[in-house]
Amino acid sequence: MGSCGAHGAGVLPGGAGRHARRPRRCWCCSIRCVEEGPRSPKFHFRPLISIGLSSLAFAYLLKPLGLVLASVALVFISAYGGHEFKWKEVAIMSVVLVIFSVLVFVKGLSLPFPICPDFIEVCPIR
């Protein structure tokens, strides 16, 4: 069946019922099996927040600014969350992503995304 330190094949079905009946024993057993070791690495919130903000920015900017500028904002905001942000690399990546997005989503799949912003009367990309 196994123990706290070395789980066997029957720990989940058999052990779960046993520990549900005696939760204090489960807690004591788990405290006893904790081993000292290296600390877990620090959790970085900046990438998580920047990716979330970039997704929200893309969603809110797609209709008024179009696919091109919303994609550029998405790439720059999400790349800012990384530990090595280089303007030149991010700019090249955003241009490649914009070209790919326009070709796949607008031209290939014929999705009705606005390509250019509303304030540009004649869009060069049609």
Image: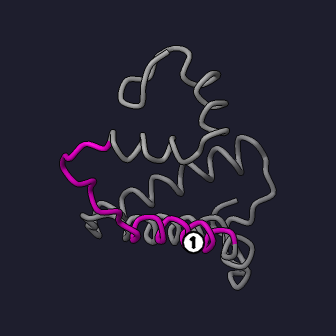
Residue 6 percent across, percent down from the top left: 37, 23
Q: Residue furthest bottom?
A: 119
As displayed, is residue 34 above or below residue 124?
above
Residue 122: x and y, percent?
Answer: 71, 75
Q: Camera-side residue: 122 or 32?
A: 32
- Asked whether 89 or 43 is in front, the reply is 43
Image spot of residue 64 (x, y percent) = 72, 79
In the image: residue 92, left or right of residue 50: left
Q: Which residues are magenta?
A: 34-59
Task: Please name the residue shown 37% across and 47% down the image.
Answer: 31
User: Total marks drawn?
Assistant: 1
Question: In which quarter of the view is residue 44 placed?
Answer: bottom left
The residue positioned 59% from the left and 45% from the top of the image is 23
| Residue 16 painted magenta | no
Residue at 64 percent across and 22 percent down: it is: 13
Q: Is residue 68 left or right of residue 47?
A: right
| Picture quadrant where residue 93 is located | bottom left
Q: Which residue is mark 1?
A: 69
